[in-house]
Image: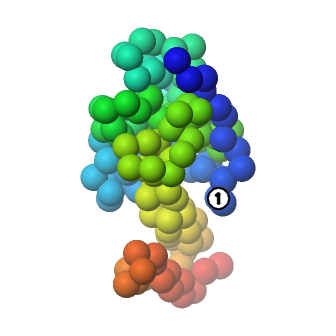
Amino acid sequence: MSKYLIQRALPIKMDDELALCIALKKLGIPFERAEAGQTLSLYGWQGKKRAERARVVIRRKDIGASANDLGFNPQTGSVVISEYDNEDRPGRGMHVLKKILPVYATARVVRTARAQGARVTVKPQQDGGYQVIIVGAT
């Protein structure tokens, strides 16, 4: 059983729960979100409940056959990922996380800009990234 790690050294702090949920929906990645003030248990690759908990969870069955659950705690900006899943290979949590990061970053920027009264246009790019055009932010 691989131990879980708390990832805080990501290219962007994942501290916006709504932007995270928007990104997961946009990518078509199934996830569970805890009720307000609650957290969800994480499960290892053998289906055993682990001590680690998170607000938003991608279940192992939606990552890969040998994967562990992948958890997000936006209140601390941390990602809970197992040692095994910390490799960027198909069927591992890090591979999924790397798909989420640019979509999450875009959703976060859009939410922040719109909250400040700006008009926002998002244009997908050929490389899989996004061009965000912000007009009129206060």
Image point (50%, 81%), residue name: 132
- Camera-side residue: 120 or 92? 92
- Camera-side residue: 19 or 117? 19
Badge 1 element: loop
Residue indicated by mark 1: 12
Looking at the picture, how far across and down is residue 123, in whole percent?
Answer: 39, 83
Is any part of residue 13 visible from this angle? yes
Image point (62%, 48%), residue name: 15
The residue sitting at the right extreme is 9
Looking at the picture, how far across and down is residue 30, in whole percent?
Answer: 30, 41
Looking at the picture, how far across and down is residue 20, in whole percent?
Answer: 47, 50
Is any part of residue 19 visible from this angle? no
Q: Looking at the picture, does residue 105 appear above or below residue 54?
A: below
Image point (50%, 65%), residue name: 102
Q: Looking at the picture, does residue 7 appear above or below residue 32?
A: below
Locate residue 62 relative to residue 41 in the image: left or right.
left
